[in-house]
Image (cartoon, rainbow, N blue to C red):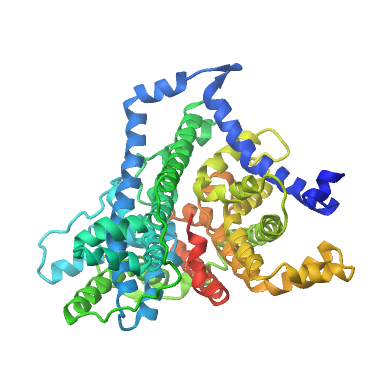
Amino acid sequence: MNWLSRYDLTPWRLISLFFLLVFFGLFLIYPLIFVFRNAFYVDGKFTLTFFRLMFQDPNQWDVVLNSINLAFLVTLLTTLLTLPLAFVMIRYEVPGKTLLNSLILIPMVLPPFVGAIGMRQVFARFGSINLFLMEAGIIRQPIDWFGTGEIYGVVVMQVLHLYPIMYLNVAAALANIDPAMEEAARNVGAHGWTLFRKITFPLMLPGYFAGASLVFIWSFTDLGTPLIFEYRQLVPVRIFDMLSNIHENPMGYVLVVVMILMSLGYFLLTRSFIAGQKFEMLGHGRVGRIPRKPSRQITFVFYFIFFCLTLLALIPHLSVIFMAISKRWFMTIFPEQYTWQYLGMIFQHHVTTIGIRNSFFLSTLSTLVDIIAGIGIAYFLTRTRIPGRNLLDALSMLPLALPGIVLAYGYLAGFSGTMLDARQNPIPLLICAYAIRRLPYMVRSAYAGFQQISISLEEAAQNVGARPSRALMRITLPLIVANLIAGGVLSFAFAMLEVSDSLILAAEQNYYPITKALYELLGRPDGPFIASALGLLGMLILSVSLILAGKFLGKRLGELFRI
């Protein structure tokens, strides 16, 4: 047919596009529709009754406000941390810049869900920090830093984990500013704070809001960290507590809808604000900026602040390591005795072995799904003229702005009573949930690879008789294998440590992934030490994955963590 040839829709492309749309329809759109239908419809009639009840219930409304305040506070604190840090790193020739850039990314190798275990130990009433301050004579009585059931620990842990993501976006935005724009402002008398406020920061807004969106959404929807700190007055935890009566209590659907609207609303608000502004820089890409050499005072202040921040960011990592190798750690700054017992137990304990085995199996299959789907989506976006490419792009990127707990809740409720019922066997839904959540990393990696390879190479192969599919398999894919490996490695690593989907969908011990096994262990006498050893394994997996991805993608690695 003429319209098929017009849009380059060969039979295999049509089949591939059909399966992609079915995949998104079943495992991305359907759960959302199911949640909205149950929140707004009763007996087939539209109603806002449940939402009125939520607003009239002070307890429910306080939970929503707490989550919003937490997200805004974490976004503000990460902004205050990263703006001066990025400014110095980009604008000045700081000694050891390569090493410093690596140190900034350290918090990303430890999921906050795991780091919170170590933070509770170190900042306990008679933990390492209080004991050190008391021995140094700085305080006389121990300080209850985070308290039981308080939000402070959640804030600190989220800030320490998320500031690298904000930094990647802010630093990239700052580096892309045309120096001529600031030079023109200096010529008319703008300097210092005035220059930054009126010229530099407005030009950074697209990159800043991209980072702020990720930080806000992640903080607002984080389930694991509040659970570890036992702070339950947040929307994700309240939804988690309602899983037991998911079909009887509609308030769970209402809270999920609130979470969706808040996350997507914030994302679209920042996008619309950026779209309504003009950020063109005529000289961009033509004039290079020469980093200045900082004065001794600036260098000293920068290194002091950087050292303090890095030390604070390393506390969760070090505390998890110490807990994993300690035999006894009570009322002392450092463990009294050390042992390899708990590290050995992660491959012997029945809960940890189940978790490791299941996570490797689930993550491997979900990564294969991501590789196939990511290649297909990137191919359609870069090599075809099919109608609706923007929709396909939006669907593949939507999981970045969509909380994992939303999909997990939709899966649990929407597929209940079907052959995919998670209460009977969560494996298929866990694979799909992991794949959907990490698909954006694969799509971006593959997309970058396709952009770098000229389409003329495939056209040349087709001119000598090769089918488009053969040209893709024999010519293009071997040339972008580095991008595919990088995206696959990251998809695998983050799937291994996925929290929300694992906690919600895996109800029985035989199906526990690593994160659910870790959460289960915390309630046992020696559980925190075994959980720390298991967390150390997760830290190692994520560290190796980021290093490998960085080797293949180089400076483009940061693009995977931007909206």
Q: Nearer the viewer, residue 524 or 76?
A: 76
Placement of 68 over or under 365, stated as above or below: above
Quadrant containing the N terminus in the rendered view: top right
Q: Nearer the viewer, residue 155 or 84?
A: 84
Q: Residue at x 19, y 80 (%)?
A: 295
Q: Is residue 419 left or right of residue 539?
A: right
**Residue 241 visible here:** no
Q: Nearer the viewer, residue 420 or 442?
A: 442
Q: Nearer the viewer, residue 473 or 189?
A: 189
Q: Residue at x 61, y 17 (%)?
A: 44
Residue 435 location in percent, x, y? Answer: 63, 54
Q: Residue furthest bottom?
A: 95
Q: Residue at x 41, y 75 (%)?
A: 102
Residue 559 location in percent, x, y? Answer: 50, 63
Residue 401 location in percent, x, y? Answer: 50, 47
Residue 500 location in percent, x, y? Answer: 51, 48
In which image quadrant can residue 473 be found? bottom right
**Residue 436 visible here:** yes
Q: Residue at x 55, y 77 (%)?
A: 551
